[in-house]
Amino acid sequence: MMPLKYLIVGSGGPTGHHLRHILSSTGAIIVNTTHRTPAVGEMSDTIRWTHLDIFSVSEGLRSLSPLIDGEKLSGVILFAHPKLTRNKHPLPFGEMTGFSQALEGVKAIYDHCLPVLDNGSVLTILPCLTLLKAGGYLQARVYFGGLRGMVEEYTRTISPARACFLTLEVAHLPGETAPHLPESLLSRMKDQTLGGFPDPESLARTIADLVIKPRPWMHGETFRFPKTGLL
């Protein structure tokens, strides 16, 4: 019996570290992409790496193909948070939509993986901007709004028997994540998030639970971790 295989896009952070070890402990092969340099200790026969930047995916997809072709994927997990910064002044329209390349990159990744998905899950992980009451994050909201629309379109056109598309909103992604928030705002968000901000390991276990056990009846659902109050 062939081992299960998962693709984690953007797994260079602390949550990705825990996630690949949780998944690999089941005997699965983990293919990781990052725009960083992976630690030597994170490489093995069952934990594989390739460089991929969602702003320019063509080269990354070429290097990814040999790692996934010829075998079915059991799941795709995408940490969809390019570096986003706060802008205190209104942005010109061109800059406001500057993340369109990233959206093209995400779509290219999904389209590349769909033919080899074996009744698996496609999980998109987003920071929860609903909690962000401060202004200045228009670019982030436009990007994540576009990404939500893209995932919703896949849920309308792809059968859950082929791939179950899910979205996970996280109150705040641990580690170097975006958007970069003032400490005072982070403190307010943490105080008003039921259960506090997730630590990397507990978040990784939640992600693993969503992808290890395919649930076709959840196709198109959005989950939030942890449950949150309002600012």
Image (cartoon, grey):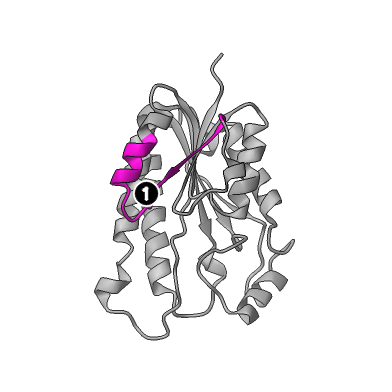
List the residue tagged with mark 1: 106
Measuring from the top left, give residue 105's x and y in whole percent. 33, 50
In the image, taking residue 186 as reference, residue 140 lies left or right, namely left
The image quadrant of residue 83 is bottom left
* Residue 157 appears in view: no
| Most distant residue in the right direction | 195
Q: Amino acid at mark 1?
A: Val
| Residue displayed at 54% across by 17% down | 2
In this rendered view, identify the residue nearer to me: 72 or 14.
14
| Residue displayed at 37% across by 86% down | 89
Measuring from the top left, give residue 3's x and y in whole percent. 56, 22
The magenta stretch spans residue 57: yes
Against 110, is 174 above or below? below
- Element assignment for label 1: helix
* Quadrant where the N terminus is found in the figure: top right
Classify 10 Å Cα crowding around label 1: few (below 14), some (14-19), many (20 and above): many
In the image, taking residue 181 as reference, residue 84 lies left or right, namely left
Please state the total of marks drawn on the protein image: 1
Q: Which contiguous range is marked in magenta?
A: 45-64
Measuring from the top left, give residue 112's x and y in whole percent. 34, 36
| Residue displayed at 29% across by 45% down | 58
The magenta stretch spans residue 49: yes
In the image, taking residue 153 as reference, residue 188 lies left or right, namely right
The image quadrant of residue 144 is bottom left
Measuring from the top left, give residue 80's x and y in whole percent. 46, 54
In this rendered view, identify the residue nearer to me: 73 or 134.
73
Against 223, is 72 above or below? above
